[in-house]
Image (cartoon, grey):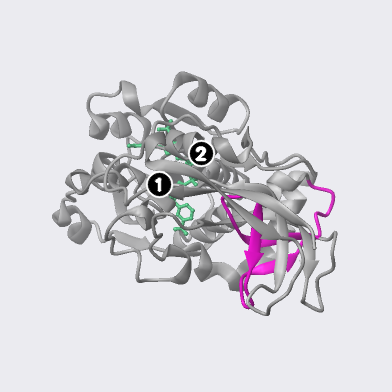
Amino acid sequence: MEEVNNKLVAIKGHINGAPAESDFEIKSETICLSLKANEVEVIVKNLYVSVDPYQLNRMKTQSSSQGTINFAAAISPGHAIDTYGVGRVVASGRADLEKGELVVGLLTWGEYTLAEPGRLLNKLDAMGHDLPHHVGALGFSGLTAYGGFYEVCKPKKGESVFVSAASGSVGSLVGQYAKLFGCRVVGCAGSQKKVDLLKEKLGFDDAFNYKEETDLKSALKRYFPDGMDIYFDNVGGKMLEAAVANMKQFGRVAVCGVISEYTGSGKRAALNMLDVVYKRITIQGFLAADFLKDYADFMKTTTDHLRTGKMHSLCDISHGVESVPSAFVGLFSGDNIGKKIVQIADQ
Ligand SMILES: NC(=O)c1ccc[n+]([C@@H]2O[C@H](COP(=O)([O-])OP(=O)(O)OC[C@H]3O[C@@H](n4cnc5c(N)ncnc54)[C@H](OP(=O)(O)O)[C@@H]3O)[C@@H](O)[C@H]2O)c1
């Protein structure tokens, strides 16, 4: 029975503020690459793993997100950390999966995943797309953007849309769906390089660097003099407050995530609820898992758009399991452009 060394990333203790690389450790364990007991059904060699902001909420001592849905469950210090990703089957006790096949699903921040029965893991048909796209635009980021925009924002052609963290994984896709749908789209991001990318490559009508604005309410008024119909919120905090102040009557705010609030509870948005009442604004949170019913439509639409070059899938790839902590920490200072992924092994 072949034995290998499996390196994996774990937190040293709970993280209750901004994460630092020193909060993580790289652990080593010896694993056997053949199945002997039924507690492990499939062994996967991890190829590309996703790095996502929501993991920080799992790393806290306590967060209201942790009890809501399985994938948001608390992470214990010292233990393997689940994440979405693409890998290759090394050994399988499942009738529908064979050694050597590509799979997509819940892997780990490590070199191998020992998948127990019932774990989300499906055979991957790459359909000619590079594997990292199946972690980003064709994975959960894509489904989040697609469902969040079409189902929650309920867009109409010609409406005005504002997207925050617009050069990130979800935001870059939302802006492109909205443009293809026929909306006017403005995005914000944290650097001039990102702003240029939004306007020059992704087709946004306009974009601005929010870090250079001293008054976010007036900045949004400049870009939306008549107000906005839709705000796709990835950041929460002060930007959410400013957006609500600039919504049109019957505007929709889709709250995808509030990354500016993940690093400290003192940063929570304080909305002007009179605006919400008198402008009859709808504010709705959602999770990607709400849109599994739309998965086939999402895949068809998005693979078509990518194949015809109408949409761009941006991947920001680091290499090696040791780079996971810095990749993760970098999300909170805007290091990434597009979907942050770590390539663990060669295909
Ligand atoms: N509801 C769901 O099911 C679901 C699924 C996926 C993601 N999400 C949420 O969607 C949001 C985006 O996720 P993603 O995976 O696409 O990440 P991402 O946008 O690719 O990466 C995070 C980006 O957020 C921006 N950011 C970091 N700290 C910030 C702060 N304090 N204020 C403003 N912007 C900040 C940075 O860009 P800048 O340089 O522009 O600051 C950074 O690059 C997150 O809130 C995430 O939790 C929700």
Residue 195 screen position, x and y as percent: 49, 25
Residue 143 screen position, x and y as percent: 58, 58
Question: From the Cβ of disc 2, is ligand 1 less than 8 Å away?
Answer: yes
Q: Is residue 275 left or right of residue 25?
A: left
Q: What secondary structure is marked by label 1?
A: loop
Q: Give the image quadrant in which the ligand numbered 1 is located.
A: top left
Q: Is residue 227 left or right of residue 328?
A: left
Q: The N terminus lies in which quarter of the figure?
A: bottom right
Name the residue beneath numbered marker 1: 234
Please say whether residue 137 is visible from this viewpoint. Answer: no
Which residue is located at x 28 percent, y 46 percent? 261
The first of marks 2 and 1 along the sequence is 2
Q: Are marks 2 and 1 in contact (CB under 8 Å)?
A: yes
Q: Residues within 10 Å of mark 1 (few under 14, many from 20)?
A: many
Question: Magenta part of the protein: which range?
Answer: 102-129
Which residue is located at x 51 percent, y 62 percent? 288
Displayed quadrant of residue 99: bottom right
Which residue is located at x 74 percent, y 71 percent? 35
Amino acid of disc 2: Gly
The number of discs equals 2
Query: With respect to residue 185, does 106 lie above or below?
Result: below
Q: In the image, is residue 133 part of the stretch drawn in magenta?
A: no
Query: With respect to residue 298, does 25 lie above or below?
Result: above
Q: Which mark is residue 24?
A: none
Q: Which mark is residue 168?
A: 2
Residue 68 screen position, x and y as percent: 37, 71
Q: Residues within 10 Å of mark 2 (few under 14, many from 20)?
A: many
Please say whether residue 326 is visible from this viewpoint. Answer: yes
Q: The C terminus lies in which quarter of the figure?
A: top right
Amino acid of disc 1: Asn
